[in-house]
Every structure is written in structure tokens, then in C-alpha cells.
Amino acid sequence: MSEKRVSISVIRRLPRYYRFLGMLEEKGVSRISSGELSAKMGLTASQIRQDLNCFGGFGQQGYGYNVTDLKKAVGEILGLDMPKETILIGAGNLGRAILSHMAFREKGFAITAIFDKDPALAGEEIGGVVTEHIDALEDFCKIHKPTIAILCVPKMESEDLVKRLVDLGIKGFWNFSHYDIGVFYPGVAVENVHLGDSLMTLCYKIKELDEAK
Amino acid sequence: MSEKRVSISVIRRLPRYYRFLGMLEEKGVSRISSGELSAKMGLTASQIRQDLNCFGGFGQQGYGYNVTDLKKAVGEILGLDMPKETILIGAGNLGRAILSHMAFREKGFAITAIFDKDPALAGEEIGGVVTEHIDALEDFCKIHKPTIAILCVPKMESEDLVKRLVDLGIKGFWNFSHYDIGVFYPGVAVENVHLGDSLMTLCYKIKELDEAK
DNA sequence: TAGATTGTTAATCGATTAACAATC
DNA sequence: TAGATTGTTAATCGATTAACAATC
């Protein structure tokens, strides 16, 4: 059974393929070769073919790839065809921004609830969803069984919340906090977005560029 | 001269070291071995020593590393000791959220201006900085010479803006748009934050976990 | 000194690139 | 058919891990 696990390096390139294929589709391009796509994306053609062939043969010799079909296939590999109930924990600046940003951009994710510990926010509507007090978390999850939690709370509050959420059956965390979920709960899926880390990395790249000249 | 270039894999771990060392420092831990740190971070001790030794010998045999010294050293490697003038382009939900999020978290970055194409936002204060119309960009940059631009505008607007910003001497882009700066301007530093990609990656990880059981 | 832990070299492992036979 | 381009195997390159001598 279990085919050899596809490496995270490959997986992280899939959303980018998906985006580029979407753009090509919008432009009305129906067919593309690994060579053309690689030029646009700044990769090697070999890598694209290698990546795709982790999941099956989506192309045709002498022709290339059908843009629409390949986009659909990549979407399915990512699991975008399976809509997922998603809740937001923490309705601060970042949480709201992510919600409004995502709403029109990404498909396959339905925000079904927003929770915050601040009672003053309860009842407030954000992007068509009413914010509830965090105390309502257990009741909601037992009924609705959401799959994903977007974690937008400070690190200190995360520890307790993650425990509650894992117990309530959350399968994946989109983690904007600095709490190291993955280290403590290896059984759930975690995708960290560490904005501070990203900015520090940029800082290094600038320095490196300076030194090069 | 030019020492062999340190790989991006190593660089991306540095901010995480920096964070963990900061936490240890706050807890009053003054000394740590690569073994202890590796256990906390979920890495191998070998990797930590290997990473640090790309930049010099910060430890002491038989003792380990001095937490405060090492944190300071990592900060300097990242260039956090050189404060950088930073401007925000696009004062929408995401731009505002990032600003308020960063303000109290990261050091070494001074937001000196905010620009938006919406004239209605001009004059509005966000985190102590007044928003200006994007037309004022050239004048401002010629005087203040900012180093970093946080790009929080839709892809369509990015193309033109990035050209203007590069011409104005911006050295690094913290890019939240889907415009592929790096492909078109290889001479500037770019750090992409593709939130949509990250969420899709989470989606895959959930699927993978499901299939494993 | 003896014990601990680094810095560094060597071995392993994995990911990327190159090459080419298969085939549309 | 001839030309193009894939799927896939082999070669290369780089990153991680293991081992150990150096040394505090």
C-alpha cells in the first residue's frame, strides 16, 4: 500500500503551480509544456515533471499538459475539492484581516464561526459571520465538527486553546501564534505562519545583498 | 574573500533560534548546550552546531553556549542591530493588521510612512503614522531613502508599484501580493508571504494525515 | 584531571538536475 | 512519419546526521 511519502519540498511547490495554472487558464492558455512553465516560474522543467510525477502522469508526450485538467488535478492533490469547515480563534486585527483577505481569494474553506475571549466582541459580525465568546467553543464544535482552526491569539493563550481544540477534534491548525503546536501534538496537521521570522529572513537577505557588492 | 554562501535552509532556522534564545533569556537561563536546545526545538544537536558554525564558534567546549551572547550574535547575523526604515504600501485590512501586529513584536524596523491609492485614507493615522496618498511616494523616498517596502496591494497594482519602488532605491520587499518580484527583479531582496499557499499546504497535510490512518 | 560539549570532518541521506528512451 | 515532449532512470549536488578529536 503506502506509496513513498512525498516530500514537503514538493508539496510546498504545488500551491504555486496551482496559482500559475489558474493564471494561464484565465488568459485562455489551454496547453503548456514543462519547459514553458519552468521559464515562467523560474524552475527547471525537470523539476516540474519530477514533482507532478509523484502523483501520476498528467501530461502527454509530444504535447505537454492541458492547463485546465492539470490545475484541477493539482487542486485535488491538495484537497481543495473537499470544502473544510474552518473556525477563527482570535478576532483581533490579524484575525479579521486574514478573514477578509481569504474570503474572496481562497476556495474550499468555509468560515463557520469566530471566537474571541473579549466579551465586547461577541455579536459583532465579521465577513458575514457573528463572533462568539470563546466559552461557546465546546458547544459549537461538538455540533459542527470543524476541521481547521485559524489560531490568531497570543502565544500565552495558545497552549490552553490548542489543547481544547485538539480534544474537540480539530485536525489542522493554521497557526499565526508562536506556540509550537507541532512539537507537542505530532498527531495534528500544523502550518505555521511566523510573520516575525519572515521579516527577519528578509533582513538577512538585504544584508547579504549589500555584502555581495 | 567571499566565504561560501550560507544556504537558505540555515538562514530560515536563524529566526527560530533567535526566538527560542529570547525565551530562554526571559526565563533566566544563562547557558544551554546544543543537546538541550535541540530537544526543545525538535532538531538534532548536530544541526544546531553545524548551523551556528557557518558564522563562527559561539560556544565553548565542555560548557555549551551563553544564551545572551548567542542571541545577540544571531541577531547581528540577521542584521537586526541595523534598524531599517520601512514603508507600508497598501493600508487595507492586511496592511493595518501587519502594522499593528509588528509594532510591538519585532524590533529594528521603523515604519516611517504608509501609502495608499485611496484618497479617502490620506491623513488617517495608523499606529502613530499618518497615511499618505501614493502620489507622494516619490517625494518621500527621495528624502527619506527607506530600505524596506511592505507590499500589501493586489497583484494587479504591484507590477507598477514595484518598478517605482525599485527605481526609488528600495532594497527589500516583504511581499504579501502574488506578484512575482523575484523573477523580474533578481537584484533586490524579496521575502514572499503567500497566505493562500500556506493554507493550501495545510489542506494537503490534513489529507495526508487522514490517509495515513 | 575527568567530564562535558564543542567544532569539524566524514558518511549518509535526500532533493535537484541531466539525460534519454518511450510515445503521442 | 518526424518532431516534440513526457515519464523515468541515472548522475550530481547539497543538506543533514553521525562520529570524534580538540579543548574548555
Image (spheres, coloured by chain):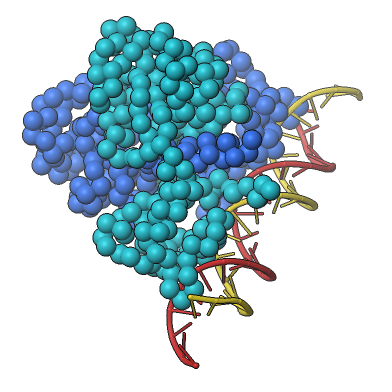
Chain colours: A blue, B cyan, C red, D yellow
Residue A140, located in which quarter of the rendered image? Answer: top left
Is B17 rendered above or below residue A131?
below
Q: Position of residue A179 (x, y in %)?
A: 30, 50
Residue drawn 20% across the image and 32% down it: A91
Residue drawn 24% across the image and 29% down it: A93
B138 left or right of A6? left
Is B58 rendered above or below residue A67?
below
Is residue B190 or residue B204 the one in the foreground? B190
Q: Position of residue B157 (x, y in %)?
A: 46, 13
Q: Is residue B70 visible?
A: yes
Is residue B179 or residue B128 the one in the foreground? B128
Residue drawn 58% across the image and 12% down it: A28
Q: Position of residue B71 (x, y in %)?
A: 40, 55
Is residue A116 or residue A37 the one in the foreground? A116
For this orientation, the residue located farthest to the left is A119
Q: Position of residue B198 (x, y in %)?
A: 42, 36
Is residue A29 or residue A213 the one in the foreground? A213
